[in-house]
Each structure stands twice: as structure tokens, then as C-alpha cells.
Image: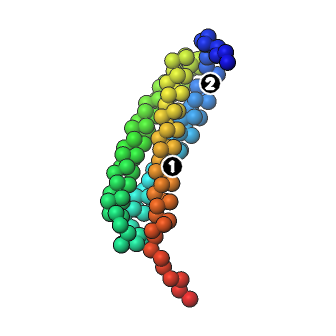
Amino acid sequence: MNIDKTTTTVTPTKTIEELYLDVRHWKSNLLFMEDEIRFVDHLLDSYIFEPNTPGLFELMQDYQKVLKATRNKKRLVWQHIIKHENNLGGMLEHRDKACDFDFHQKHDVLKAEVVGCVADFQNLKGEIFNYASEILKKRKPKH
């Protein structure tokens, strides 16, 4: 197997407007994520879980801690997005349509940060929902 180890120069292909659309999409994802975090937080604080489940309290506390860390990470990513968006706004305002390679790299790093933040939360949410579905109180249907 022969691996080509030559380096290639990446030419930025997105315009400032396209980068700005990415930012709007990221902000939308994080706003939706905040709503989901609030829902999961309320779920963990509710009394719908079977009370005699071994280790329930400790696990709920662990989930609350991870959820709080996730919310803090989301806030940090949000701040990075706002700073990036402000830089884009300055470029648009000054009619500087050219984005240099460094700015595109920063954009890609921020994109990875957003994707990672959302993916980490989706994994946590899935874990909580899977656990919760097993220990929800069984309610008899009313006839």
C-alpha cells in the first residue's frame, strides 16, 4: 500500500455569505439543543421514575452533573460562534469578500466544536432516554 504524503493547499471555497449561513445553522442547532437540555433536566427532576430502583438517586445525580457540564460547554461554544459571527459581520460590512485560509481553518475548527458538542449531547440524551424507558413508573390505563 502506497500512501501519498505530499501536502496540498486547500483553497477556501465558501464565500462570507455561505460561512454566515453556517453560523446561523449552528446557532439554530444550539438553540434547539437548549430546549432539549431543559426537557431532559425536567425529566430528571420529575417523579415519574420507579422509586425503588437500586442506585436511582446516584445515577440521576450523575446525569444532572453531566447535563450541567453539557450546558456549560454549549454556552462556551455559543460564545465562540458569536465572536466568529462578529468577525464575519465585520468582513461583510467592509465589503471584504475574500476570506483567507486562516479564517476558513478557524471556521472548520468551530464547526467541529459545534458538531462535537451536539453529538455529545445526543449521546447523553440517548443514554438517559434508554435508562428512563426501563424504569418509568408503570401506570395502569384508566378505562
Is residue 22 in view from this perspective?
Answer: yes
N-terminal-most mark, 1 or 2: 2
Q: Which three-letter amino acid code belongs to the residue tagged 2? A: Thr
**Whether residue 94 is situated above or below residue 139 in the rendered picture:** above
The answer to whether 80 appears left or right of 92 in the picture is left
Q: Which three-letter amino acid code belongs to the residue tagged 1? A: Gln
User: Dot 2: what SS?
Assistant: loop
The N terminus lies in quadrant: top right
Farthest residue, direction top: 6
Residue at (40, 58) in percent of width and height: 41
**Whether residue 115 is situated above or below residue 39 in the rendered picture:** above
Residue at (46, 64) in percent of width and height: 132
- Residue 53 spot, x, y in % from top left: 38, 69
Q: Which one is in front, 110 or 47?
A: 47
User: Dot 1: what SS?
Assistant: helix
Q: Which one is in front, 128 or 68?
A: 128
**Whether residue 49 is situated above or below residue 83 in the rendered picture:** below
- Residue 81 spot, x, y in % from top left: 46, 34
- Residue 88 spot, x, y in % from top left: 51, 26
Is residue 82 in view from this perspective?
Answer: no
Residue highlighted by disc 1: 122
Residue highlighted by disc 2: 15
